[in-house]
Structures are given as structure tokens and as C-alpha cells.
Amino acid sequence: MSPTLRIVCLCTGNICRSPMAQALLKKRLEEQGIGSAIISAGVLGLQGYQAAEHARTAMRMCGLDIEGHRSQKVSLPLLRMADYLFVMSPRHEATVAELDRALLDRVVRIWEYASEPLEKAGIPDPLKGELKDFIACRQLLEDCIANWIEGEFRQEDSHGQGR
């Protein structure tokens, strides 16, 4: 039995991008037969908020339910328990560096796995956008996550070792 991957998804408020990424990662890793414990958090410090309405709708449209999600603030113990830290923008990576520079080797700049290069560094925050913006964000996250998993675990399979 392989060990369980521990992943923390970080964004700003923990109500849009990171809860969507959390659900998408969980689904994709389960499909690959990879055990995982995935949580999400935000650098802004929001506590106990539901995912944004459009985020919940965009996820329902692809068969995933994030209705029970409640936002939480990122913390050093949370980051230290993770094997991977999925960040949505350079700002989130900077927060990791401020908390503990030794954790930077665990950071995954998820936007770097996009099939098409992004104009700006990072996954655009759809917070004040319309449903179509949340759907576009979800689709971008799906693309990036699929590419990351393919690259991370194909390498593991071919060399017989992972992280």
C-alpha cells in the first residue's frame, strides 16, 4: 500500500480557487488510485465561510459537491504536515516563504502546469466575476491538475520512486 499524499491548496480567501482545487484533486487522485488527504486554506484569514455561490454551482456542474466547505486561515502547522503546497499565485507562495522558507521545496505553482501559458502568473481569482468566470477557473484548474498528476506520477512510475 502506498503512503497517503498530504496536500494543502492555498488561495486568498479559501472560498473560490482552493476549495475547487481541493475537490478536483481529490477526484483525480482517487481515479488514479492514489491515496490522499487534501485540505484548503486561505492567506486572508477568513474563517467559517461557505465557498462562493458560483464556485459551488461550477463544481456541481461537473458532479462535485463543495457545499460543506468552510474557509480556514492558513497556519504553519497545516503547511508543515503537507507533502505538497498547491499555490494559486505568487502571493500565496510568498506567504509560505514568510511562514517558513524551508517549505518552499513543497510548493507547486499550479498555474505552471497549464496547457496554454497564462498571461499573468497565477490562476485568476474569479471572486467578483460571473458564473462563466468560475467555470473558466474550474476548467483551468482541471487542466493544470491533470497535467501535474500526469507529470508527477508518470515520473514516479518510470523511476520506481516518488517524492
Image (cartoon, rainbow, N blue to C red):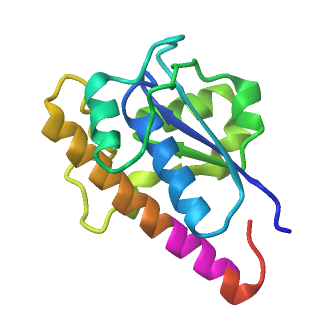
- At horizontal 25% and vertical 29% (from top left) the residue drawn is 54
Q: Nearer the viewer, residue 126 or 36?
A: 36
* Residue 72: in magenta span: no
- At horizontal 77% and vertical 38% (from top left) the residue drawn is 81
Image location (x, y in percent) of residue 162 = 74, 71
Q: Quadrant of residue 75?
A: top right
**Residue projecting furthest to the right:** 1
- At horizontal 33% and vertical 50% (from top left) the residue drawn is 62
Q: Nearer the viewer, residue 39 or 113?
A: 39
Vertical side of 117 occupied by 68: above or below: above
Q: The magenta stretch spans which residues?
A: 149-156
- At horizontal 51% and vertical 25% (from top left) the residue drawn is 68
Which quadrant of the rendered structure holds the N terminus?
Answer: bottom right
Vertical side of 108 occupied by 133: above or below: above
Q: Main secondary structure of the magenta part?
A: helix
Image location (x, y in percent) of residue 82 = 72, 43
Q: Nearer the viewer, residue 157 or 135?
A: 135
Q: In the picture provided, is 128 more to the left or to the right than 147? A: left
Q: In the picture provided, is 106 more to the left or to the right than 126? A: right
Which quadrant of the rendered structure holds the C terminus?
Answer: bottom right
Q: In the picture provided, is 15 more to the left or to the right than 119? A: right
Vertical side of 147 occupied by 108: above or below: above
Image location (x, y in percent) of residue 92 = 48, 33
Q: Quadrant of residue 126?
A: top left
* Residue 154: in magenta span: yes
Q: In the picture provided, is 22 more to the left or to the right than 106? A: left
Image location (x, y in percent) of residue 146 = 44, 66
